[in-house]
Image (cartoon, grey):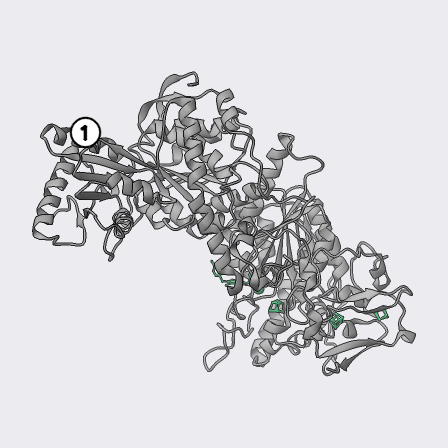
Amino acid sequence: MIAHKKRVGMEVSIAVSHAVQLARAEAIAAYPITPQTHIVEHLSSLVANGDLEAEFIPVESEHSALSACIGCSAAGARTYTATSSQGLALMNEILFITSAMRLPIVMTVANRALSGPLSIWNDHSDIMAARDIGWIQIFTENGQEAFDHSVMAFKIAEDHRVVMPTIVNLDGFILTHVVEAHELMDQETVDRFLPELKPYHKLDIHQPVTMGAFAMPELFTECKMAHQEALTNSYGPILEIWQEWGELTGRHYKPVETYRTEGAKIIIMMMGSLAEVAEAAVDAMRDQGIPVGLVKIRLWRPFPFADLRAALAGAELVVVCDRALSLGGAAGPVLAEVRSAMYPLAVKPQILGYTVGLGGRDVQPEAFEELVRHAQAEVKQGPSQEFYIYGVRG
Amino acid sequence: MEKFGYAESSKFDTYASRMMPRDEFFTSGHRSCQGCGEALAVRWACKAIGKDAIIAHATGCMEIVSSGMPQTAWMHPWIHVAFENTSAVASGIEAALKVLKRKGKLKGPLPKVVAMGGDGGTSDIGLQSLSGALERGHNFTYICWDNEAYMNTGIQRSSATPFGAMTTTTPPGKRSFGQRTWKKDMVAIAVAHGIPYVATASPGYLFDLYFKVKKAVETPGPAYINILSVCPTGWRSATDLSVRLARLATETAVFPLFEVVDGKYRLTVEPPKIRPIRDYLKPQGRFRHLRDPEVEFIQKTVRAKYELLLEKCQAPFPEFSPVHVPEGI
Amino acid sequence: MSKAWDQVTWQEIEIGGVLTEPGSARAYNTGDWRSSRPVWDKTRCIKCGVCWTVCPEAGISEDADGYFDINTYCKGCGICVKECVTGCIKMVVEES
Ligand SMILES: Cc1ncc(C[n+]2csc(CCOP(=O)(O)OP(=O)(O)O)c2C)c(N)n1
Ligand code: SF4
Ligand code: SF4
Ligand code: SF4
Ligand SMILES: [Mg+2]
């Protein structure tokens, strides 16, 4: 049964904090950084007004924000934080420890370029620098998705088959600071969907445990393997929870999503809000008779290899758009992932990579037509570069 | 017969050992070096904390000796996350307990929250996170195991390393006499946060330590205790001297024992006579290279700082008299 | 974990590497480190318990008669010898 729907216009940041409120987060520790600020400001006012029964810890850094979150989560509270860019980078050390300790913290990352030079604008270099942190990582495309996934993330993270911290990415400014229409949920429905947190382990004086013990070489690999398996196997429960949400709301989500890929020989790929721009480009190219489609990765970790291969079956040319650089390397991170996913296949498409929209650089629909033409020419003559940076002057 | 000083409780003299709690919360089987004064301090601090507490611990010697998978020496619910963030972790635990209590998910009185770390994890890399947690007023106790260097990584200097001490990053040489700076005054830094309880303690006066830790965990709001933790490995001292050296640190006024309750200073151990600094320096290999001018500078500075402290405590000035130390004490 | 710890498989690692048995370090006998041990002259012992207090290992236990002696965890540091109020403990070299 589809639950009762209200469409409400609000800033996406407010919608995300409302989702956290509906999820009844109990502990929030955060440090302000543009463009995440509206989320935590709104949450602090919800706590201050008694509209959310939670502790808000206004810590003195992001390093402490995530560390405090670890304390909250380990003590058994449903825990949330949000950050961006430099803040995520400052958390880096603790990101890995959070997932190794298997604490089901939910974090919003309002994606923003990493310094330097300093830029407050959107790209994915912050989260890509944290690619291997061992968290579940989800990308969203618009405010509705950001809202939906912010609720679902708690259920995924806390599921006893999963027990894994989870990041929901949304593009800074492009999403965080725009007003969109959202279908919100009522508290009762969310409560039914998301039961109270049952911590797998917690710091409890009645049943003391030691958390964060160190491992000698004889056990370290086994610990890592357990983490790797748990993250990979979270795939099933994630899909189940998305399915349940779909039945509840009519909004269905998949690890890899496609747009007009029927009969497409050319596929454009990306993650995040740029997909909405690309859809317009695909429509325009289809009108011109170019057999092009769009593939979007929603679930970045665990990486959905099988879904990706299925989505790209039949494609001859794949144009991967990255929002980050792997400086001095062969490709942007999404390109590298897609290439290695496709490499074992006997029949595989040409895969070319373009880094676009760095540090808030605007990307118009025409850009994608240009990329497709450029990629076709490159394939014909043999690629002249490992990857390309789109729109750079000089 | 020397007394374990706890000025307020004259009944706790040496014979009172038997009256102290027998339960061990930092258990045997931990892998500290022989004669580790830090482990002794942990043992007694944990007794004082009592069983209804959650401990967050920083990376460092005491974490490493106690928590190698699959064994733990801790009886408390205990968590280690990283080196510099223990106060933040404790903040989170404390905040979570409060909200869980409000929501009725936690029965009984709130467990105490205690954060622990070495001098490096406290006065250097962890200072920001400690300052944040003290300033925010979380109800927790922070205990610094001050062995005056980064022992776990091989005796490198910290800001708590005393003037003149040899460490592996302040080696004496043609152009060096060891550590060039005076020990950072963590107690003053803690006091400056306006928190209700700050104290120094050492394993040389275990009852004094015990009652201070007890007082700290029972004080609502943040509390800070700096415990001088003799480290035979890093100090290059005999393993059997760990308690004796801690006592000498107080008897020579290098490490006075006092507490600051709501900003009010009070000396808890008042040596009637202050022994010369050489008595403390001599048994420690880390000071062996020091020459007379440095020793005299240390003596003068220690005395000046002690006099300032006595003024704050409004305590009478003791006699500063040289006491002969028999060879090898 | 009853298994030898270097035989533990990844499937047997507790979620998050959490250790669920408090004080399990007691299974590790630090007494093996000792090269000399404290020996008590009980005729001079006043049963004050100071030796028990100052041991970093909790390596001293009290017997039924109220006397103290080392348990299996004594690492042989000698602190108890130095701190004994009557001087009735001596270090002797451990025979192997
Ligand atoms: C971010 C970070 N930097 C450095 C280290 C390496 N490290 C581990 S323990 C330690 C020194 C600990 O010194 P202290 O806090 O004084 O504790 P002690 O071992 O002396 O008891 C260092 C430098 C680390 N673990 N993490
Ligand atoms: S190095 Fe020092 S503090 Fe560390 S365990 Fe050894 S004696 Fe104790
Ligand atoms: S020698 Fe050291 S370890 Fe052994 S009982 Fe005495 S104090 Fe404890
Ligand atoms: S300290 Fe000495 S006198 Fe006191 S109980 Fe121990 S052995 Fe006996
Ligand atoms: Mg140290």
* Residue B87 at x, y percent in the picture: 56, 49
Q: What amino acid type should be assigned to the residue bearing mark 1?
A: Ala
Q: Residue at x 72, y 36 (%)?
A: B108
Res A196 quadrant in image: top right
**Residue A141 at least partly seen:** yes
The foreground one among B100 and C10 is C10
Could you tell me which residue is drawn at 69 percent across and 47 percent down?
A: B217
Residue A123 appears in the picture as rendered: no
Question: Is the C-beta of the residue carrying label 1 under 8 Å from the nearest atom of ligand 1?
Answer: no
- Residue A323: which quarter of the image? top left
Percent position (x, y) of residue A286? 13, 30
Residue C6 is left or right of residue A230, and the answer is right
Q: Quadrant of the C terminus of chain B?
A: bottom right
Residue placed farthest to the front in the image? A346
Relative horizontal placement of residue A178, taking residue B317 as reference (left or right): left
User: Residue at point 66% right, 78% down?
Assistant: B283
**Above or below — where is A227 with respect to B3?**
above
- Give left or right: position of A276 versus B140: left
Question: What's the residue at 41%, 29% (across, down)?
Answer: A243
Looking at this view, is B41 or A253 the one in front? A253
| SS state under label 1 | helix
How many numbered dots are placed on residues in this image?
1
Q: Is residue A78 above or below residue B313?
A: above
Give percent across and percent down for residue B158.
Answer: 52, 65
Q: Which residue is mark 1?
A: A280
Measured as percent of width and height from the top left, residue A87 is found at: 39, 45
Quadrant location, ligand no. 2: bottom right
Q: Chain of mark 1?
A: A
